[in-house]
Amino acid sequence: MNEASLTALLLTLQYASLATAIVFVPGMLIAYVLARFSFPGKVFVSALTSLPLVLPPTAVGYLLLQMLATDGMLGREILGFDLDILLTGKAVILACAVMSAPLIVRTARIAFEGVNARYEAMARTLGYGPVETFLRFTFPLAARGLLAAMILGFTRAMGEFGVTVTIAGNIPGVTQTLASAIFSAQQVGNDHEANFLVLVALATGFCAILAAEFLSMRGARSRKSP
Amino acid sequence: MSNGHEIQAQLNLPLDRFTLSVDFKLHRHVTAIFGVSGSGKTSLLEAVAGLRRDAQGVLRLGDQLWQDSSRGIFVPPECRNIGYVPQDDLLFPHRNVRANLQLGQRRARRQGQDVEALQQEVITLLELDALLERRIDTLSGGERQRVALGRALCSGPRLLLMDEPMAFLDLGMRRRLLPFLRTIREAFDIPMLLVSHDPIEVQALCDDLVVLRDGRVIAQGEPRITLMQASRDAAELAHLVENVVPCRFDRHEGEASLVRIGHAGDGPLLTLPRVSEAAARSQMIAVRSQDIILSITRPKGLSARNILPGMVRRVAAAGKKHLVFCTVNGSEVELAVEVTVTSLRELDLKPETPVFLIIKATTLELC
């Protein structure tokens, strides 16, 4: 394994972790609101949060590119300063965050829906306010499902390619991730390198899915109390 | 009960089939909210607990105003100081029994209560010592309900709300739990609301009874009399007339146990199949009105173990049936006996008719 591949792998782990960390808390809160409350436009919000799951990643990348371009919504001409995101590590994190958010929101929502809302009512009668009820009761009761959400989100971030190459490019040592390194290795015919990188991707992906499956299975069983 | 414990409720709450609409004042120690399934009992309890934000109206406990919709006042459930025992116990599966009992302690401590002493008292009364370190999913149905009751009491509530605490238990377990509820009743001088559709439970535990039907109060008052009235007015309640009378355990005799009925425990003896030592501590015995036979002559050669001389006091119609109320000689106990119109006519039953009440031992239940 050459140094460029190792750098790509380490960068990918770093970017995917950061992206998951940034998206997890807001994603979980959106999931909780979607699981517990009904409000006008709920279906719309729900659909919007799932949209990146069904759009071609290059389309999502293109939209972000348009927004971040000099004359875009978040560009220098409107903001008055440069966010300096495109073609940097920040762009990779943004790409990973946008693409893993739908998985986190959907999985966390299922985790919250699996917690009987009457437990929350019970906690309220025992003297706990709404925020404390969430932190002390809802959160631990949904913990397994939330961990599964985090793992799935992280894995999705690890594998991100389409949005990343569109807004961050494929710069070795800066924005080249596992996925784009595989692409590059295959393009130049370096099968040995490609094989190794694919093996790493396979191993991490498989472990993550197994862990998530295991967690949601255990979660479902522990909730079966009468 | 002092006036500080009075519950005053004028509530309206839209439900699926009808609008729950009640207006009552409760000032007795234990009040039963009674009615068939789907009559709005649970929703009423939840509204009192503050768990139904869509309920409109006025609600007070003593001098505390919990809700006044016209003035925009709504005290959230965490500030109402209630102990809530739901049907499905809702024990937290991620904590053990001790931790579940301690969940409401913080509130009790804030009010300056001695939480350690309170917890010890509750553990003793409900016999929870052996369960403290157990995981929730290893408990039986009856144990779960005792823990749920204990958790509510350990929070030092000003009002105890119990939603059919025995609904998911089989009959044997219910009869074992009932003495615990009686103990709690004696030990805690706080108002209690008990949702129930079990006439035995209601008569054994409650001082006041509110009968709900399709979201409205159709009767309120002393449990036995109110049940009678309700069963006369509403055909679906007609089967609910049960006799629950005070008794005191006397002795075991081979395969049988004997109890004396009457408030002082000095009335005639009743024989029933041998009961456990725990059941022998019960102070109430139940017999359904349809399980008693009346005879105007002393019967001979009968298998029934209990033949009590008594006298007809009054006859009342209940739905399509008739109830004959008889006193039992040698006690102040009055039993309702269900008879058909034909029997009533043929035996010529009217006040002052001397009769014999025949009760099979196996139909008697201590509670």
Image: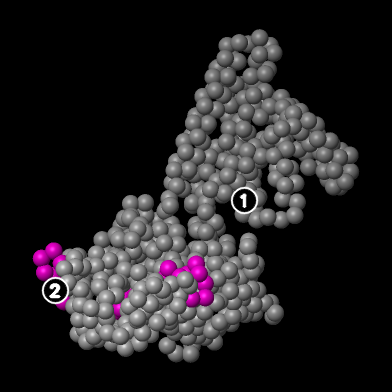
Tell me where residue B237 appears, x and y as whole percent: 47, 69
* Magenta residue check for B271: no
Q: How many callouts does the rendering have?
A: 2
Compared with residue B191, is residue A176 higher up or lower down, i.e. above or below?
A: above
The location of residue B17, given as percent across then percent down, is 63, 62
Residue A128 visible somewhere in the drawing: no
Mark 1 is surrounded, within 10 Å at the Cα level, by few (under 14), some (14 to 19) or many (20 or more) other residues, namely some
Q: Which mark is residue B251?
A: 2
- The chain that hosts pointer 1 is A
A159 to the left or right of B299: right
Distance between the Cα atoms at labels 2 and 1? 59 Å
Colouring chosen for the image of the structure? one colour
Residue B242 shown in magenta: yes
Q: Quadrant of the N terminus of chain B?
A: bottom left
User: Which residue corresponds to the image point at 59% horizontal and 80% vertical from the top-left?
Assistant: B23
Q: Which residues are magenta?
A: B231-257
